[in-house]
Image: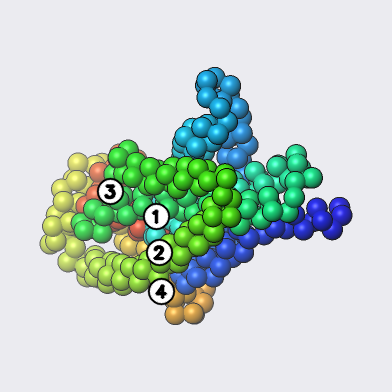
Amino acid sequence: MDGVLLTKLLVALVPVLVLIMLFERLDVFRLVTTSGVLAYLGMGAALAVLSYVANGRVMDGLPIGFTDYSRYVSPVIEETLKALVVVLLFARSRIGFKLDAAIAGFAIGAGFALCENAYFIALFPEANLGVWLVRGFGTAVMHGGATALFAVITHEFAEHRAHREGRISHLHPWVFLPGLMVAIAVHSAFNHLPGAPLVAMAGALVLNPLTLLAVFSKGGATAHDWLEHDHEAHAQMLAAIREGRFADTDEGRAVTALARRFPRRIAAEVGAWIELQLTLVLRAEEVLLAHERGEGLEVGDAERDQFRRLDALGRDLGRAARHAIQPHLRFSRNDLYELNMLRQRVG
């Protein structure tokens, strides 16, 4: 590979990777691991391939020129595809806070752009350096920023009720529409400036990172407050269970009433299942708060054994019983995320 082509490749690919590294370092809670970032990049790259096929099929069937298609149609297709992965992460409780929502969204969009840029540079290696400057510092950052904005806005809407009521909020379709509309608008606005590539590049390079830095600044404080509040509430509930006071609470009376409907063997395991869940959620919160203080908290065999026991109890209870009990524990989607985070770290 000659030096000029290598320079073009670096310019097209490196800027967005540097931004991902910066955002990962700003995550004081270490919510997203390096392996997680790599997985998100891979997802984004796979979406770029799918998008290329989808755009080709749709463009062939529409009686409009390439310019109008790139402004009004391809942003809808590409942002919707990227958004679907983020929706899946929300549904599986793999996103808990705005910080990891922003990182996950940006990494997915960055993976999309890296694959797209690598393909175009292989297709048009003779294109001048200015093209790759715009694509590397502009298009790639725009893709990452648009998907990150979708994730952050969706988090705000999806978790509004959870923060207020302390329980899992249902992921209604309308929750995702505002963020998707913003992502499509950002993408379309960028594609409206083919005649002013430097303006488009400057807008993407300045506005997207600044917006995400503001999210990190605000999101860090919000995550700290949420963790502190949650930790205290969970510690109180766990103490009530261990001291035999849980049955006298509203949640305890509801769980006791439900347990009476179960077979005796299953009813006897409900308390152990709840106590073990609380123990692990508390441990996950301790790990996150320790990371924020710059401390390392080791997790390993003890937590792994607790997860095995939790899974065994969950299988004994059955899906229907677990779903009937869970709402009375006032666990939020963040709490389920914390459990998943801890499970991954001990795995």
Q: Between label 2 and label 3, give the one nearer the viewer.
A: 2
x 52%, y 24%: residue: 64
Q: Which residue type carries mark 4?
A: Leu
Q: Which residue type carries mark 2?
A: Val
Please indicate, yes or no, whether residue 65 appears anywhere in the rendered image. yes
Q: Which residue is mark 4?
A: 289
Q: CA distance from mark 4 to mark 3?
A: 24 Å
SS of the residue at dot 1? helix
Q: CA distance from mark 3 to mark 1?
A: 16 Å
Residue at the right extreme, as displayed: 2
CB under 8 Å between callouts 2 and 1? yes
Q: Nearer the viewer, residue 312 or 323?
A: 323
Q: Which residue type carries mark 1?
A: Val
Report the disc number at residue 169.
3
Q: Which residue is mark 2?
A: 215
Q: Which residue is mark 1?
A: 152
Mark 3 / mark 1, whichever is N-terminal: 1
Position of residue 285 measured from the top left corner of the image (x, y, whole percent): 38, 68
x 57%, y 40%: residue: 47
SS of the residue at dot 2? helix
Q: CA distance from mark 2 to mark 3?
A: 22 Å
Q: CA distance from mark 1 to mark 4?
A: 22 Å
